[in-house]
């Protein structure tokens, strides 16, 4: 894939966007899977720290590739977590959703080894309560799975996965689709018609979304969130 991801036409999975609408090559659809666009960031304007909340800001920086700005988790920092879960995480501020689609362009910058990976987060409520997908190069009980963190160390909940995620040094397109009513979770990697992973879990019906890694590094761009915005329940 190109090293400049901003100017590819957005693909639409399943349902069409507004009938008859014509989109510019870099314009995302207003709706996807019948959910409205509630957040987008291509990192081209302003300080990402105003829109993102990292677990440790020292791990992140805005960088540029061939004139295109990307949000880079450029180093691994072991952050303190209440239970075993990914160390490097950056969640979108003030975006709490139920049903949602998280659509991201990402690039692994880690060395080539079995657990080479990046993570996407959803249903994130706090550091001890979240879902995440670990896109690992080789599958085992702790890699290349969908996980839940529910006040105890992460636990895999995948009902389907593959032998591993085919990482290289190029950009890839990942989509996470979450339906809170059915509990269904689908994860797509480049092929937006056939899910790479699936799970069913109804534990968390709301939360934020995020990007990052367990203990590797990577770049992120063109983050889109489609969803039903909800209010965070009062404690």
Image (spheres, helix red, strand yellow):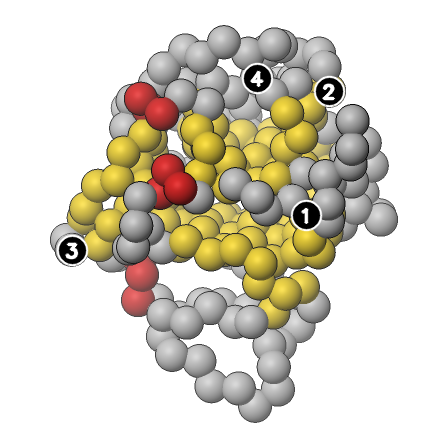
For the residues labelled 1 and 2, the Cα–Cα distance comes to: 18 Å
Q: Give percent across and percent down for residue 216.
A: 37, 23
Q: CA distance from mark 2 to mark 3?
A: 41 Å
Give the distance between the C-alpha atoms of the residues marked 3 and 4, in whole angstroms. Answer: 34 Å
Q: Of label 2 and label 4, which has the lower sequence position?
A: 4
Q: Secondary structure at mark 1?
A: strand
Relative to 59, residue 173 above or below = below
Instruction: Say left or right for 117 vs 208.
Output: left
Q: Residues within 10 Å of mark 4 (few under 14, many from 20)?
A: many
Contact flag, marks 2 and 4 (Cβ < 8 Å): no
Q: Residues within 10 Å of mark 3 (few under 14, many from 20)?
A: few
Q: Can you identify the residue that label 2 sits on? A: 150
Q: Residue at x 85, y 49 (%)?
A: 181
Q: Which residue is mark 3?
A: 67
- Mark 1 or 2: the one toward you: 1
Q: Is residue 196 above or below residue 77?
A: below
Query: As drawn, which residue projects farthest toward the bottom?
Result: 20
Task: Write down the residue under mark 1.
Answer: 97
Instruction: Say what secondary structure mark 2 lies in.
Output: strand
Q: Which residue is mark 4?
A: 85
Position of the C terminus, as image quadrant, is top right
* Eye-nearest disc, 1 or 3: 1
| Left or right of residue 135: residue 176 | right
Would you say residue 84 is visible in this rendering? yes
Task: Identify the image quadrant of residue 78.
Answer: top left
Q: Earlier in the sequence, mark 1 or mark 4?
A: 4
Which element carries disc 3, helix, strand or loop? loop
């Amino acid at each position: 894939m190109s090293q400049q991801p901003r100017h590819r036409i957005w693909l639409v999975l399943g349902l069409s966007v507004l009938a008859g609408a014509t989109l510019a090559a870099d314009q995302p659809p207003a709706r996807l899977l019948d959910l409205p666009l509630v957040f987008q960031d291509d990192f081209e304007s302003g300080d990402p720290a105003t829109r993102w909340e990292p677990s440790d800001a020292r791990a992140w920086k805005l960088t540029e590739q061939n004139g295109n700005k990307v949000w880079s988790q450029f180093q691994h920092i072991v952050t303190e977590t209440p239970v075993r879960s990914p160390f490097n995480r950056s969640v979108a501020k003030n975006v709490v959703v139920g049903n949602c689609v998280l659509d991201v362009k990402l690039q692994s910058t880690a060395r080539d080894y079995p657990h080479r990976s990046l993570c996407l987060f959803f249903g994130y409520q706090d550091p001890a309560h979240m879902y995440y997908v670990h896109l690992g190069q080789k599958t085992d009980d702790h890699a290349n799975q969908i996980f839940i963190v529910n006040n105890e160390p992460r636990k895999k909940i995948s009902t389907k996965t593959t032998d591993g995620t085919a990482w290289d040094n190029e950009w890839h397109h990942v989509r996470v689709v979450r339906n809170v009513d059915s509990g269904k979770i689908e994860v797509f990697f480049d092929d937006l018609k056939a899910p790479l992973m699936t799970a069913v879990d109804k534990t968390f019906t709301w939360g934020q979304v995020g990007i990052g890694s367990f203990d590797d590094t990577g770049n992120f761009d063109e983050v889109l969130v489609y969803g039903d915005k909800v209010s965070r329940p009062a404690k």
